[in-house]
Amino acid sequence: MINYIWCGMIIIGIIVGTLTGNIEAVSTAAIEWAETAVELSLGLIGVMALWLGLMKIAEEAGIVRGMGLLMKPIMVKLFPEVPADHPAMGSIVANMAANFFGLGNAATPLGIKAMQELQDLNENKEEASNAMVMFLAINTSSVTLISSSTIAYRSAAGAANPADIIAPTIVATVVSTTVAIVACKLLEKLPKYKREKVTTTKVEIK
């Protein structure tokens, strides 16, 4: 759908440029910004490679597992439906660690894996469980210590001090995550959103 929208905008731009006699300006702008996009993408490779590598080292060194142990009391409170030793807990912690360091690309597959494991625990496969909703809310708001991706974008765009967003990012994400958790906990208790446990009945086959 997004591809169709962009394609439509490009066609409209060409038509308008032709009718107004500015097709040359449209072509020049397209070439210049295409060059800028390539330069920006290449500038991101180094920073993203650094942080993705550090994340992998942290995972192999057991730092992510250590974070999981430290966060276990909190995780049990946030996800009471999920057993403490279930693989979903490990995937959730790994996803949160990746988001903590602003590694959006690394966090995505971990988030998908965590959601699949939460779905395995879900009694009603047609609706998201409270744990799934909570995880989605935390993943979306995600407390971020170092927004690596944004710093990389700013650096590639020529910002004088790309890292000066760290403090505002920490404050904003702490507030957003707190609001997300409180909202989930309050809404799941309301009759409208309260999930009923699925009961299965055994059918005797003669």
Image (spheres, rainbow, N blue to C red):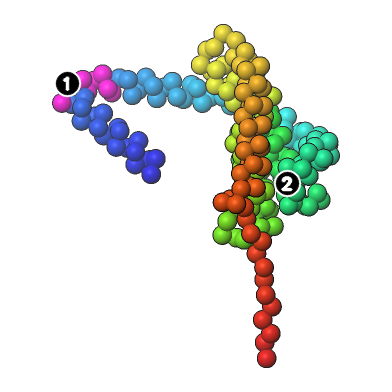
**Which quarter of the image is occupied by the C terminus?**
bottom right
List x then y, in percent, for residue 20: 16, 22
Seen from the viewer's position, the closer of residues 66 and 28 is 66
Picture quadrant of residue 127: bottom right
Seen from the viewer's position, the closer of residues 61 and 133 is 133
Which kind of residue does numbered mark 2 sit on? Phe
Which label's residue is closer to the chain start, 1 or 2? 1
List x then y, in percent, for residue 21: 16, 21
Counting the numbered discs, the total is 2
Q: Which residue is mark 2?
A: 79
Picture quadrant of residue 61: top right
Which kind of residue does numbered mark 1 sit on? Gly
Q: Which residue is mark 1?
A: 21
As drawn, the label of residue 174 is none
Disc 1 element = loop
Seen from the viewer's position, the closer of residues 180 and 122 is 180
Disc 2 element = loop
Residue name at image x 60 percent, y 60 percent: 125
